[in-house]
Image: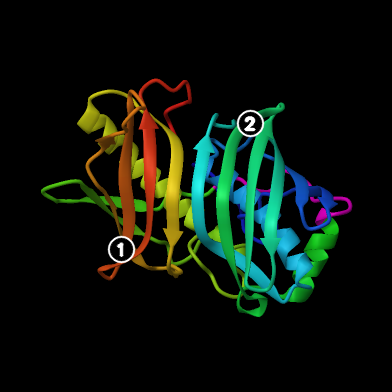
Amino acid sequence: MPKQASGGRFAAFSFVDRIIEIDGLSRVTGRFTISPQVSDFPVSLVAEAIGQLAAWVAMSHVDFKFRPVAALAGDTRIFKIPQPGDTLELEVDIESCDEQAIVYRGRARVNQEIVLELLDTLGSMLDINEFDSPERLRADFACLTSTGRTPGAFLGVLQPLLTALPVDQGCEVELSVPEQAAFFDDHFPSRPVFPATLLIDALLRVAQPYAEKVVGCKVTAIRISHVKVRAFTAPGTTLVLFAQTPEAVVDEPNTWCIKVGTRNAGKTIAGARLYFSSTSSLESDL
């Protein structure tokens, strides 16, 4: 992405323009329009948009005393890559929500067609004051549930520096998290954290060409499962991303699974399984 947002609330890493309907504590719908100025919109940010919509309802339900953070995502199904200028119609079904956690599933549509679906997703609730101002979040929520915000503020994020590391088996890459970045203004103002969805995007960018090299053909990502994020990543951190050798998926022809993970100072802090297909019609450039 050659451009990035200048920073600030609703500008650098916010993916809900308007909350359309809240049906008690069971279902919520919203909308986000991808700016035509964005050169590409990673599929992980579609999942981020669904998660942010769920987070707004969760924060409102507990009177902005706690906020959910990414912890577990059981299954993410990718059906289509949205394009700049597309409007994401967001839907979240909440299974449970209290001061400890929110459990939900959701989906994003473009022109009534599902582009991504989240299943079995859990966000642990933490003290909201650690991340942002409750008063400002209440005001933001009031804006989103009334007039909404003006679309188009998000102009993309610069890709973090990736450096290949020599290994005998699998694939390892060093990722340098920037000391400063516009997205930290949204994620989060009081405690900057490298977004888990940007980490997943980086893992996809590492694993896809490695899978193509091993299997000998072009592949596209169709599913992400068993996502676990065990620790926050601060600005300036150096991470090691690793991908194991692709394995053919039994009973799913032309599909491979790669176990991926992230280490910080030698300790594994995140992991997932990425599924790639050589027959999918999805665009391959994630």
Please tell me whether the stretch drawn in magenta is mainly helix, strand or loop.
Answer: loop
The mark closer to the camera, 1 or 2, is: 2
Answer whether labels 1 and 2 touch (C-beta < 8 Å): no
Q: Position of residue 130 (x, y in %)?
A: 61, 78
- Front-most of residues 247 and 47: 247
Callout 1 amino acid: Arg
Residue under numbered circle 2: 114
Q: Nearer the N terminus, badge 1 or badge 2?
A: 2
- Please, what secondary structure does the residue beneath circle 2 have? strand
Q: Residue furthest left?
A: 168
Residue under numbered circle 1: 263
Q: Residue at x 61, y 45 (%)?
A: 155
The CA distance from mark 1 to mark 2 is: 33 Å
Residue 248 falls within the magenta-colored stretch: no
Task: Report the span colored magenta.
Answer: 144-156
Q: Residue at x 43, y 51 (%)?
A: 226
47 up-or-down from 84: above or below: below
Callout 2 amino acid: Ile
202 up-or-down from 175: above or below: above
Q: Residue at x 54, y 35 (%)?
A: 39
Q: Residue at x 47, y 52 (%)?
A: 198
Residue 149 falls within the magenta-colored stretch: yes
